[in-house]
Amino acid sequence: MKDFFNKIHPIDQSILDAYLSEWTEYKAPKKTVMTAPGETERYIYFVLDGIQKSYYLNQHKQHVIAFTYPPSFSGIPESFLTQTPSTYFLETITDSSFLRLSFEKHQQLMHEHREIETLFRKATELLLIGMVQRHYELMAFDINQRFKSFAQRSPHLFSLVAHKDLASYLRIDSSNFSKLFNTIKI
């Protein structure tokens, strides 16, 4: 976790150690809804093991927004940052283990240590950059380009995540996804 944080923004090791000491372990079995629409995200998570997905439901159909897996943050970021109810789900795909930190403790530590606040500002900037890139790909790329871009960026997920979830994430019909999948070598 230290390496992950230091790649985002280097922090004095004594401050980072004090910050990390506040995170607690949390485990969730597969298919656990960690946050549902209407619930406020009270924790920021750091994924140690497992895969999770966030998704909207529209007319009983899942629309996958994102996958999280080690090493990365997880949760419903806008709900956590604003402490307002989530509009979508966060669910574990596999048994998962995390370190987590409450919103209140996170705020307290950011207030006490400017370096931690800078770290999370930069992490939020990276999240925004990723979201803008994803939005661009969904708006500008055809299904072949979306599939190829994903295959280059995250080939490991083809064997870890159900293809129906990957198809939803890429906004590709399942039958078209299968055809595209059969054209690549992993």
Image (cartoon, grey):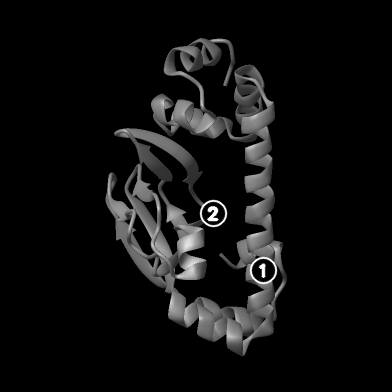
Label located before the other in sequence (2 or 1): 2
Say whether residue 30 is left or right of residue 150.
left
Can the viewer see residue 1? yes
The C terminus, quarter of image: top right
Dot 1, how many residues are within 10 Å of its Cα: few (below 14), some (14-19), or many (20+)? some
Indicate the secondary structure of the residue bearing disc 1.
helix
Q: Which residue occupies the foreground of this view, 104 or 85?
A: 85
Q: Which residue occupies the foreground of this view, 15 or 60?
A: 60
In the image, residue 136 lies at what x, y percent? 68, 36
Quarter of the view holding residue 163: top left
At x 62% / y 84%, what residue is drawn?
Answer: 15
Dot 2, how many residues are within 10 Å of its Cα: few (below 14), some (14-19), or many (20+)? some
Say whether residue 15 is left or right of residue 60.
right
Indicate the secondary structure of the residue bearing disc 2.
loop
Give the residue pinned by disc 1: 121
Give the residue pinned by disc 2: 71
